[in-house]
Amino acid sequence: MIASPMITSPMITSPLASYYFWQKWTDQTLRASADFFKRANSLTRLQAASSPHVAQTPADVIYTENKLRLLRYQSTVARAAESQYSIPLLIVPSIINRYYVLDLKPGRSLVEHLRARGFDVWMIDWGTPGEEDRFVTFDYHIEGYLRHCVECVLDATRQSELSLLGYCIGGVLTTVFAALHGERIKNLINLAAPINFHDDGLLSQWARAENFPVDLLIDVYGNMPASLLQPSFKWLKPTTEARNCWTLWERLDQPERLNDFLALNQWAEDNVAVPGETYRKFVKDCYQNNLLMQNRMMINGRTVDLRAIQSSLLNITARQDHICPCDSAAVLNELVSSQDKEVMTLRGGHVGAIVGREASETLYPKLADWLAARSGL
Amino acid sequence: MSKTDPFAAWKPVQDAWMESWAKAMGETVSSEEFARTMGQSLDRYLEASDPVRRQIQDSMEKYLRELNLPTGNEIIHLAERLTQIEMRLDDLDAKTDEILDLLKTRQAEDDSTQGATLEEKFAAPPAKTSRPKIRRAAKPRARSRK
């Protein structure tokens, strides 16, 4: 008999092996199909379910001004419990997204972690600007809103200085404020806050004067609409939407991870408009002319000189940050006069490094330890 | 990866395809031509849409006035005035707090100088140790839009 692969194959020569092979194949196929229908069923139920609950750490609204709210987070132990540390912490989020990214959900909340460690945590909720806010300036965000919030925190806590933590554009605001009112700032923490806006990043390229008609845009629209801001961030990574669809499909049978994904996705879709004059000045002074890094930015007639910053500085950057490249943020440490300063570089992107799964295990404890050593008892 | 799982073979193909697509799109959006084209498109769109937008707005305003209904701009102006009123109330609140603080300080001084001689009573008061209330910064006035 002529030897051939067909004749020598176990499928042919061993009926029992063949039987087991097909049985296993059928079993795998049926299991995969069942998994597919189970996920499809989860997807259908998901469409009818309510949005994930975010910003669950209880807080009191201590001060309001226009759309702004100043929140004070209650102790996780008892409402009237005193904080362990005397220096309060004021968190300043970005003005183009909602504040609750730093209080996403239990277990994914920087606020919750710091409160549990005994800090007196305050946060600004910038609110949702309306058409009537189109003339609110960048200067007013610093010398108006932020200054009033700082004074409110200091009055309420009877302290003469506080710690400021700024995330993204919030970090730009806190840096400018620390340069102008350094006597009130004990510690400055920046999370992925750009300082050098002329870098290799895409936003720097897209926002150049020859590529981005910011004056015409604001003159036409009044405010910078969220409907234009959101796509611009999505275009930084064009395949994000497709990846998100696949990620959602993969997590449909993992309730905990699915909830994390949905909470973060809700925040990512929750952009707000930016007051027109604020946006105009921010783009022209920062992205187009890079005045902040050159110590030439003016706020209410005063020059913002980064060398005036003497408070303790913790500058946190993310290695894969496509919105604020590492070097764009880290450069601040070379420009300030602080003696006590440090750069902490994390793994992850602009948002992932701050609110991802690893953040609660690495970033939050390190940040709390750094702050604890500088917040008095 | 099991040889008998029919769906297992799809995942690496899908991952590889997604990776190459992401790379190609990333290179496209990083190019100078893309940035320039997007800027020019936005510029042309804004130039073209602004007159149309204004015309629609003017027509809507006329129509709403005929029906005796408020226009969007009128509601926005009302909101601006409400914000200004809020600011003035906050300023009044801050001033009232300042006055109360001064009265309390004065009362405390009077209590401590009870029984003192006239010279001691009208001696220079001690320097204030409390931090003064910060007056609210002036809110930018609305400019008229062209």
Image: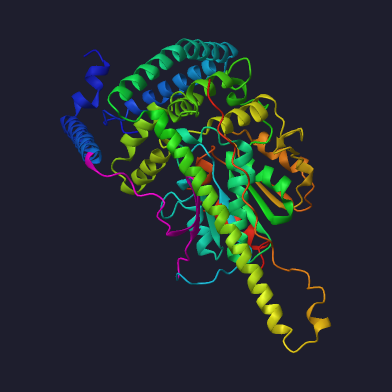
Can the viewer see residue A316 in this picture?
no
From the viewer's perspective, tell me whether residue A295 is left or right of residue A109: right
Q: Quadrant of the N terminus of chain A?
A: top left
Determine which quarter of the picture holds residue A264: top left
Residue beneath the point at 57% across and 31% down: A277
So how many labels did they put on this image?
0
From the viewer's perspective, tell me whether residue A252 is left or right of residue A363: left
Q: Reply above or below: A12 against A305.
A: above
Q: Quadrant of the C terminus of chain A?
A: bottom right
Residue beneath the point at 45% across and 12% down: B51
- x and y percentages locating residue A230 in the rendered image: 45, 29
Can the viewer see residue A132 in this picture?
yes
Q: Reply above or below: A141 against A131.
A: below
Q: Reply above or below: A62 against A209.
A: below
The residue sitting at the bottom extreme is B115
- x and y percentages locating residue A83 in the rendered image: 56, 68
- x and y percentages locating residue A333 in the rendered image: 74, 43
Residue beneath the point at 75% across and 48% down: A309
Nearer to me, A60 or A237: A60
Determine which quarter of the picture holds residue B118: bottom right
The residue sitting at the front extreme is B118
Nearer to me, A124 or B1: A124
Q: Is residue A102 magenta?
A: no
Image: magenta residue range: A48-77
From the viewer's perspective, tell me whether residue A168 is left or right of residue B129: left
Nearer to me, A230 or B16: A230
From the viewer's perspective, tell me whether residue A257 is left or right of residue A329: left
Residue beneath the point at 39% across and 38% down: A265
Q: Reply above or below: B28 against B121.
A: above
